[in-house]
Amino acid sequence: MHQATIPTFIRALSSLADVLEKAAAHAEAKKIDPAVFINSRLAPDMFPLVRQVQIASDAAKGGAARLAQAEPPAFEDNETTFPQLIERARKTVAYLETLKPEQIDGSEERTVTWKTRTSEKSMKGQPYLLHHVIPNVYFHVTAAYLILRHNGVELGKQDFLGKS
């Protein structure tokens, strides 16, 4: 469970930070106000880039913490710049690096409970990780990548996949 969680999320959030750095450099080189990217969205009913990054961070740190029976750090959701978004992704990675295998391994059958905006939900650890947390992390990392790509930031598949 640890191997499926922590290295996976660290890679996704590290790649996200790198993509955000490329976007910041692109905005500077093209003389585009970074707020254009940060507030951009793919569709009117989707969250903007800033919220995609925040949710990816929350899903990774919250999901891992619940599996580890730990309390994740609370971030304020007040980022408005690329440096702040990059810092958030990197702070999430730093938190994930504190979680040890013995905290997460063995959580397959442990009941995990969390609150949504409208209710409280529970699942066993393995389906929670595989069918809820991992898809949510990747959905929001992908949405952030696509918002930037759609807005002209030169990104490719390797940017999304990250460094080996």
Image: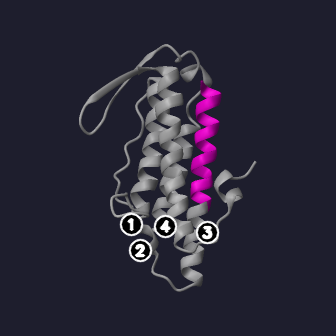
Dot 1, how many residues are within 10 Å of its Cα: few (below 14), some (14-19), or many (20+)? few
Mark 3 lies on residue: 22
Q: Which mark is residue 35?
A: 2
State which tag comes first along the sequence, 4 or 2: 2
Residue 149 in the image: state x and y as whole percent.
Answer: 57, 67
Identify the residue position indicated by label 1 in the image: 80
| Three-letter amino acid code of the residue under disc 1 | Thr
Q: CA distance from mark 4 to mark 1?
A: 7 Å
**Left or right of 123 on screen, residue 153:** right
* Residues under numbered marks 2 and 1 in contact, where contact means CB atoms less than 8 Å apart: yes
Secondary element type, mark 3:
helix
Q: What is the secondary structure assignment of the residue under circle 1?
A: loop
Residue 159 found in image quarter: bottom right
Q: Earlier in the sequence, mark 3 or mark 4?
A: 3
How far apart marks 2 and 1 lie (CA) works out to: 8 Å
Identify the image quadrant of the N terminus: top right
- Residue 120: image x %, image y %? 28, 28
Nearer the observer: mark 2 or 1; the answer is: 2
Residue at x 59%, y 75% (from the top left corner):
25
The residue beneath circle 4 is 82
Residue 141 location (% of width, % of height) = 52, 51
Picture coordinates of residue 160 (x, y %)? 64, 55
Task: Give amino acid for label 3.
Answer: Lys
Examine the image and state in which quarter residue 104 appears: top right
Q: Which residues are magenta?
A: 1-18
Task: Identify the mark nearer the N-term, 2 or 3.
Answer: 3
Seen at 51% across and 39% down, the residue is 135
